[in-house]
Amino acid sequence: MGACVDFDNTVIILDELKFDWNESDLREVISLYNEGIKASKIALRFRITLDDIFLVLFHLMREKRIKSRPGGWLG
């Protein structure tokens, strides 16, 4: 787990998670998600955690690039 930085009691959270994505990887996540691939398998494909997949799917949902699906985001 990444270290949290404390600046006068200000804590930076989630610093160990992935927030940088290139557009081609986002398109691949969208495709896999729309095919019904489980979130855990998408995470394995990108060698990242389920938390990272949650964040990217949350982002894509907010951007209206994906819709909810049967089984939810976990698939």
Image (spheres, rainbow, N blue to C red):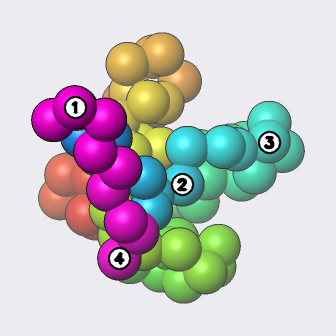
Residues at discs 1 and 4 in contact (Cβ within 8 Å): no
Nearer the observer: mark 1 or 3; the answer is 1
Give the residue type at disc 1: Asp
Query: Which corner quadrant holds the C terminus?
Result: bottom left
Left or right of residue 5, residue 23 in this image: right
Secondary structure mostly seen in the magenta stretch: loop
Nearer the observer: mark 2 or 1; the answer is 1
Residue found at x 48% / y 16%: 63
Q: Which residue is mark 3?
A: 22
Front residue (pair 49, 24): 49
Q: Which residue is mark 1?
A: 8
Q: Position of residue 64 (x, y in %)?
A: 45, 16
Front residue (pair 63, 66): 63
Q: Give SS at disc 3.
A: loop
For the record, the magenta segment spans 1-10
**Is 5 part of what is drawn in magenta?**
yes
Residue 24 figure quarter: top right
Q: Earlier in the sequence, mark 2 or mark 4?
A: 4
Residue 55 figure quarter: top left
Q: Earlier in the sequence, mark 1 or mark 4?
A: 4
Q: Give SS at disc 4.
A: loop
